[in-house]
Amino acid sequence: MADPQPPGADDLNRTLGLVRRIEMSPEGRAVLEYEAGLHMCHSGGVVQGGFVTGWIDAAMAHAAIAMVGTDTVPMSLELKVSFFAPARPGRVIAEAWVEKRGRTTCFFEGRLLDPAGKVLAKATSTLQLVDRTKVESASRAAAAAT
C-alpha cells in the first residue's frame, strides 16, 4: 500500500521518532518501529507517557488507514491507555489491529513492546472514519479564520 503523507506528517513522524513501518495490512493491522530518545524522557530515563500514547495511537491510525485507504482520516473519539512497565530509550514496537469495524465508527486495540517482546502498555480507541476532503476543508477554514 502507498505510504500516505499528509502535510506535516514528516515533522510528526520525526517528533515521534518513527524508524519504519513494519506492516500495514488491509485487514486492519499495523506495526511501527520507533526510536525512543533521551529527549523524550523525564526523571530516571523513563519515556514520558505522552510519547507512549502517541506511538500506540499512531499505530491504530495506520491500521485504520491500511484498512480503509488514504481518502479517509481516522479521528479519535476516545482513547484509553494502560501502562504496565516503563519505556526506556531505544527501539520500541507499536502494533495495532481493528477489533470491530463499523461503517463510520471502529474499535481498535494496540500495544507497545520493548525489543524483547515485553508489553509496556496497551490501549483501546474508538475511531470515527471521516472523508479526507471534509477534514482538510475544515482545517483550511479554521486556518483562514485565525
Image (tube, rainbow, N blue to C red):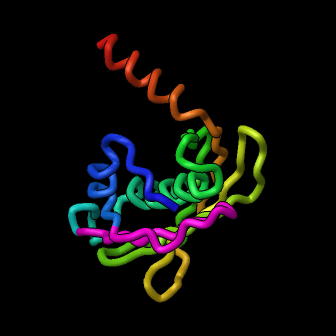
Which residue lies at the image location 58% right of the left edge and 50% below the top edge?
69
Q: Is residue 11 magenta?
A: no
Query: Where's residue 16, x and y in %?
Result: 33, 58
**In the shown orientation, is residue 33 left or right of residue 84?**
left
Q: Main secondary structure of the magenta part?
A: strand
- Quarter holding the C terminus? top left
**Count of numbered circles in the view:** 0
Identity of the residue furthest to the front in this view? 2
Report the residue at 69% width, 64% height from top.
27
The residue closer to the viewer here, 106 or 92, is 106
Q: Relative to 2, is 32 above or below?
A: below
Specify start and end residues of the magenta stretch as a single range: 19-37
Up-down relation of residue 85 to residue 76 (above or below): below
- Expressed as whole percent of the image width and height from the top left, the position of residue 31 reads 52, 70
Q: Residue furthest left?
A: 39
Tell me the quarter of the picture where residue 60 sits. Answer: bottom right
Answer left or right for 117 relative to 97.
Answer: left
Above or below for 58 versus 29: above
Q: List x then y, in percent, for residue 73.
A: 54, 40
Residue at 43 percent across and 84 percent down: it is 115
Residue 57, above or below 85: above
**Residue at the limit of the structure toward the bottom, as seen here:** 116
Is-magenta flag for residue 24? yes
Q: Is 101 left, or right, of 90 in this rendering?
A: right
Depth check, front residue: 71 or 20: 71
User: x%, y% of residue 25?
Assistant: 61, 66
Q: Quadrant of residue 75?
A: top right
Q: Nearer the viewer, residue 104 or 113?
A: 104
Residue pictured at 62% horizontal, 42% vertical = 78
